[in-house]
Structure formats: C-alpha cells, structure tokens
Image (tube, rainbow, N blue to C red):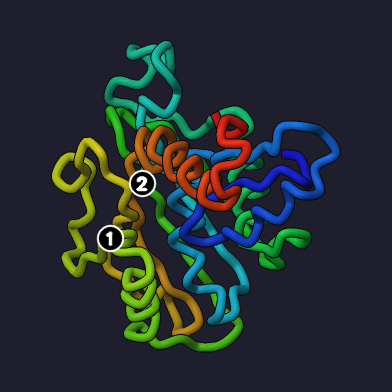
C-alpha cells in the first residue's frame, strides 16, 4: 500500500485522486480496494459525521473470494474457516486509508475477524459501530437515503431481520451495498448492521470499471490507459 497510490471508491473518496499528482513514478496509478473493504467502507462512510469511536468487523467471505483454485472443497464443504492469511490486517489498513483524508488515515479504533464460508459468491459483514455520542437510528438510515440521491442505487436498505441474503438479493451485475436492519447494539452509542456485497462485482470487476470511468473523467481523457 503506497502512500501516493489512492485506493479509490468513487462514491466516497474522489478527493484522493489528488495523490496521483504527487506520485514519484510514471503511470498515474490508482487501485481498487480489497473486496471486503469495498462494502465495509461504503457502509461506514456516511457515518463519519456522527463521530466514529470503535468499529468491529466480522466477515463471512464466499468461496469465490479465494479465486478459482481457492480453498479445497473438502475443507470448506459444510465448514467455516476462521482464518484468511493477511486479510484482517489488509481490511484494517485499507479501511482507515479510504475513509481518511488523502494524507491522514481515519482516526478510529477498528478490530477485524475474518471467516471463509461455503457460499459461492457474496461477502457478508456484521458491523458493530460505536460512536462518541448517542445516535438516532432514523438519522442513521436517512444518511444512506441522502447518499442515494447523490449516487442512485448505491445502498439497498432492509427492515426484515432475515435480509439481506446472497441467494435472494444479489444480481449478476450488482454494485449495490445491501444493508440489513440497523439496530442498537446494547446502548444508544452503538449500532449494528449486516452488510452484503457481490464480491465479484462491487468487490472486483465492477469496481475496476467504476474507477476507470472516474479516472478518465478526472483526466479529461488524458492518460486513459494508465488505469488498465
């Protein structure tokens, strides 16, 4: 992770594109986030104004996230593996970088636990988020609705506690961040939610295309091949 290479998610940190002007090498390089971070960061971004204190992230990552060779099916079938090498550190570092300023990472405590689960696609995250002050659940939900006005279709909110589910809610080209019921997590300073993203789209190919489109727009057509 290079300090002058932006990890770009156009819906939330376009200002990080300023970093490419400071890169000490040719090419104007930008990169996607980790497939989990693509969903986690988008779920957290609208909440920054409420004063984040501590975030605990538990991932349930699908088999396709490990690539085609991936985890041997005999190890994963009817099983959950509570370890993915280097993943916890990567999620922590990238989340702080993306949600911070171009020069300073997010100042917030983050803890991460990762798991590989026997699901073909779709990464699920259980987020427990503590704030510096009490928060109102309606105001929390409203901040996602406001963001949808700026970037239509980014967030899909659910009130049914059984949702979201990868099998029922993800489409083949799904760039949405699916957020299950937002509830208090013990007191009014803590909330919890389940978040679901398509790891092969929002977390991979779709993110590449979104970054390429924004890069070309940012450069006015110049250096268009630098993002491929």
> In x, y percent, where is residue 3?
78, 46
Q: Is residue 133 above or below residue 25?
A: below
In this view of the protein, which residue sits in the foreground, 39 or 109?
39
Query: Which mark is in front, 2 or 1?
Result: 1
State how far apart marks 2 and 1 are (Cα).
Answer: 19 Å
Sequence order check, earlier mark of 2 and 1: 2
Q: Does the rendering let one see residue 33?
A: no
Query: Residue at 48% of width from left, 34% of height from top?
Result: 82
Query: Residue at 22% of width from left, 44% of height from top?
Result: 170
Placement of the N terminus among the 4 image quadrants: top right
Q: Is residue 57 left or right of residue 161?
A: right
> In x, y percent, where is residue 228?
54, 28
Q: Does the rendering let one see residue 128?
A: yes
Task: From the image, tell me which residue sits under label 1.
Answer: 153
**Dots 2, 1 in contact, CB < 8 A:** no
Graded by Cα atoms within 10 Å as few (under 14), some (14 to 19) or many (20 or more), the crowding at tag 1 reads some
Looking at the rendered structure, the secondary structure element under dot 2 is strand
Q: Is residue 121 left or right of residue 23?
A: left
Graded by Cα atoms within 10 Å as few (under 14), some (14 to 19) or many (20 or more), the crowding at tag 2 reads many
> In x, y percent, where is residue 131?
56, 78
Q: Is residue 106 above or below residue 58?
A: below
Query: Residue at 78% of width from left, 60% of height from top?
Result: 103
In this view of the protein, which residue sits in the foreground, 170 or 29?
29
Task: From the image, tell me which residue sits under label 2.
Answer: 124
Quarter of the image for residue 84 reads top right
Q: Is residue 117 above or below residue 74?
A: below
Q: Is residue 128 above or below residue 27?
A: below
Quarter of the image for residue 64 reads top left
> In x, y percent, where is residue 165?
21, 48
Looking at the rendered structure, the secondary structure element under dot 1 is loop
């Amino acid at each position: 992770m290079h300090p002058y290479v932006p990890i770009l998610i156009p819906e939330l940190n376009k200002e990080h594109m300023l970093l490419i002007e400071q890169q000490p090498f040719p090419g104007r390089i930008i990169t996607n986030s980790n497939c989990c971070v693509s969903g986690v960061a988008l779920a957290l971004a609208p909440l920054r104004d409420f004063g984040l204190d501590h975030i605990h992230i538990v991932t349930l990552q699908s088999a396709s996230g490990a690539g085609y060779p991936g985890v041997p099916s005999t190890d994963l079938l009817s099983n959950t593996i509570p370890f993915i090498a280097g993943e916890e550190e990567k999620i922590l570092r990238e989340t702080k970088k993306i949600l911070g300023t171009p020069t300073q990472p997010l100042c917030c405590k983050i803890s991460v636990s990762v798991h590989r689960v026997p699901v073909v696609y779709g990464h699920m995250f259980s987020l427990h988020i503590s704030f510096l002050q009490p928060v109102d659940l309606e105001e929390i939900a409203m901040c996602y609705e406001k963001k949808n006005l700026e970037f239509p279709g980014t967030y899909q909110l659910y009130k049914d506690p059984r949702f979201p589910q990868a099998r029922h809610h993800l489409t083949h080209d799904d760039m949405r961040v699916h957020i299950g019921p937002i509830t208090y997590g013990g007191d009014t300073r803590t909330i919890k939610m389940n978040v679901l993203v398509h790891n092969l789209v929002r977390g991979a190919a779709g993110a590449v295309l979104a970054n390429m489109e924004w890069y070309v727009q940012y450069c006015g057509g110049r250096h268009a091949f630098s993002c491929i």
